[in-house]
Image (cartoon, rainbow, N blue to C red):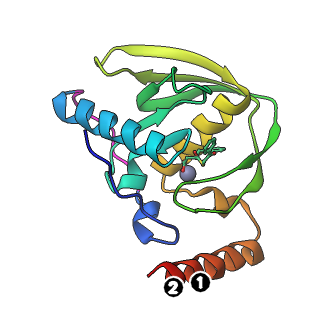
């Protein structure tokens, strides 16, 4: 397995739209395994292939406390959205920034697993938030785009300062 570099906002590659996976093969299984290793090492609770500059519809998520419930979604589609919740979100591509975003409270998702088999899953709470956040990445959307222009500008300035310090 391998740790993959994570793109940082405002990298324009974060706004590319991911293509559907045509065949779930060894290459996709290796990508998902590397993404999971990268997510756990960060540490984070989710990662979309877009964030590691691979523009294919693959997501990994584990919201458990003991890293025991790794979920992989390939070509995910939201079938139902119910209710609303405002949750504080973070993003491995926007380090150190946490902001509230309003999203659906519950979602029903259809996707392929690592064997290419279709499954559906109903999620609520943090898992539902994380699924929606990662699916946005696959569409080229970063959570800060839900915030005001002023907040987005401040975040860009703060991240630019941070990268000058760490360069
Ligand atoms: O997409 C990403 O960059 C991953 C992101 C997922 C996410 C977090 C919170 C709300 C919505 C989506 C993260 O994992 S940020 C890091 C984080 O939340 C975390 C890190 C360590 C322990 C627990 C949480
Ligand atoms: Zn993110």
Residue at left 40%, top 59%? 16
Label at residue 78: none
Q: Exactly how many numbered labels are in the figure?
A: 2
3 and 150: which is toward the camera = 3
- Ligand 1 closer than 8 Å to the CB at disc 1? no
Q: Is residue 15 visible?
A: yes
Q: Is residue 49 left or right of residue 153?
A: left
Q: CA distance from mark 1 to mark 2?
A: 5 Å
> Horizontal placement of 149 versus 58: left or right?
right
Q: In the shown orientation, is residue 139 left or right of residue 102?
A: left
Q: Is residue 22 magenta?
A: yes
Residue 38 part of the magenta segment: no
Image coords of residue 20 (percent x, y): 33, 38
Predominant SS along the magenta part: loop
Along the viewing direction, whichever of 37 and 47 lies nearer the viewer: 37
Residue 96 locus on image (x, y percent): 65, 62
Q: Quadrant of the N terminus?
A: top left
Residue 63 x %, y %: 60, 30
For the residue carrying disc 1, how many other residues have a C-alpha within 10 Å: few (<14), some (14-19), or many (20+)?
Answer: few
Residue 161, which numbered label? Answer: 1
The residue carrying mark 2 is 164
Residue 121 image-quadrant placement? top right
Look at the picture and state if 158 lies above or below 13: below
Q: What secondary structure is found at the residue carrying circle 1?
A: helix
Q: Which residues are magenta?
A: 17-24
Q: From this viewpoint, which residue is outermost toward the left? A: 26
In the rendered image, the vertical position of residue 36 relative to residue 133, given as above or below? above
The reply to whether dot 1 and dot 2 touch (C-beta < 8 Å) is yes
Q: Quadrant of the C terminus?
A: bottom left
């Amino acid at each position: 397995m391998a740790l993959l570099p994570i793109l940082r906002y405002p990298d324009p590659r974060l706004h590319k739209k991911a293509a559907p996976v045509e065949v779930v093969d060894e290459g996709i299984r290796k990508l998902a395994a590397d993404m999971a290793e990268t997510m756990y090492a960060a540490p984070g609770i989710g990662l979309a292939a877009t964030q590691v500059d691979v523009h294919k519809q693959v997501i990994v998520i584990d919201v458990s406390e003991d890293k025991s419930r790794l979920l992989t979604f390939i070509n995910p589609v939201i079938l139902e959205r119910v209710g609303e919740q405002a949750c504080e979100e973070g993003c491995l591509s926007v380090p150190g920034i946490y902001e509230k975003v309003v999203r659906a409270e519950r979602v029903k998702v259809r996707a392929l697993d690592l064997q290419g088999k279709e499954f559906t899953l109903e999620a609520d709470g943090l898992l539902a938030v994380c699924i929606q956040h990662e699916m946005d990445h696959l569409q080229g959307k970063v959570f800060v785009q839900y915030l005001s222009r002023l907040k987005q500008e401040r975040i860009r300035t703060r991240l630019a300062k941070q990268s000058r310090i760490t360069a």
